[in-house]
Image: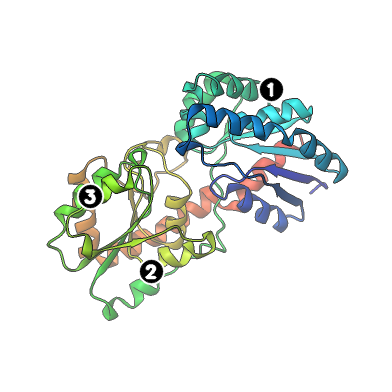
Amino acid sequence: MLALKILHFNDIANVSSTLVEASKSHGIYSEIYRIPLGNYKKTSILRKIALFINRLKEIRKLKKYFKENHFSVLHIHYAYFGILGILTRIPYYLHCHGTDIRGNLKHPIFKWITLLSLKKAKKVYFSTPDLGEEVLRIRKDAKFIPNPINMNMFFLDTNRSNEKQLHSKTKVLVISKLDPTKGIEIAIETINQLAARSDIEFTMFNFGVDHIKYLNLLQNREKIKFIDKVPYSEIPKLISEHDIVIGQLKLGAIGMSELEALAVGRPVICKFDYDGFYDEISPFIKVNNSEKLLEAITYLADNPDIRKEIGVQSRIWVEKNHDYKKVFEKLYNDYLC
């Protein structure tokens, strides 16, 4: 491979971090330019604007850092930050991840910055298929770049299947935060219906938008294990300690968490509507309401051999479609153009 030096601006859902690791395996140097982004969701509109303006102060620093360290590629993550590429006059690749399109294209101010950033980018990528309709309307040449999964970090773990005789309970991980955009109310309704099943245990995150409201909807909360945010390095262990993973149940598109669970070899139940973006049908167990979710959990809990088989096939599918080294190769070919 030709010598390139890549600077990723921002790290969304550890995508940049994973791409940096992938580039190492190809002998390409890359790093992440990080700045504190603040919590936009918990601030007023004026505060959001003030935070964004504060980000613009990075223009001189970014331009100086890019040139003094002889980078050849600027890869910006999160759509409206493309404005930094425009103002620094550095050609940039723009990577869209979710809210930067779903939310900001509806925002009275960020909409125009996002549109300009998309139009001026050298190349535009979107990381989940559901973003395609909006992004392709603005940039017809935009590409779907699957989220990269570090297959070494998220390795196939069959220990729970092999040691099933040592534990009689089926452990289910709700891997989405308590957030309405994730369809968490569907999961809660199903968990309440399974309260009588003493052989099924649930683990849930104890944070998210309106998480107190969702916690109050849960019955028999003493039977549910609640956990706080987990360091990224500990996510593989968390997944491997469970038999079944429940992902998002509303958007129809999945993120890094669901893919990472597949890589560890766990069956993932979620709402997924975008098999058409892949060459073969995904292994997700697809549901769109609490009745189907209840049916799926019950079936998998009662059939550990089926769980193991689905888990192995899940790993194969992720490796084929989301392996971080293969994803980096797709980007590398664009960088050379």
Q: Which residue is mark 2?
A: 241
Q: Please name the residue shown 45% across and 67% down the image.
A: 237
Q: Please name the residue shown 41% across and 39% down the image.
A: 253
Q: Nearer the viewer, mark 2 or mark 3?
A: 3
318 sits left or right of 29 in the view? left
In this picture, is 101 found above or below 75? above
Give the CA distance from mark 2 to mark 1: 45 Å
Q: Which quarter shows the C terminus? A: top right
In this picture, is 233 found above or below 11? below
Q: Earlier in the sequence, mark 2 or mark 1?
A: 1
Q: Check the image and tell me how it is coloured.
A: rainbow
Q: Nearer the viewer, mark 1 or mark 3?
A: 3
Q: Earlier in the sequence, mark 2 or mark 3?
A: 3
Q: Which residue is mark 1?
A: 120
Residue in front for this viewpoint, 76 or 29: 76
Residue 202 position, x and y percent, is: 27, 61
Residue in front for this viewpoint, 40 or 67: 40
Q: Which residue is mark 3?
A: 216
Q: Which amino acid, mark 3?
A: Asn
In this picture, is 314 found above or below 168? above
Q: Secondary structure at mark 3?
A: helix
Q: Which amino acid, mark 2?
A: Glu
Give the CA distance from mark 2 to mark 3: 26 Å
Q: Which amino acid, mark 1?
A: Lys
Residue in front for this viewpoint, 288 or 224: 224
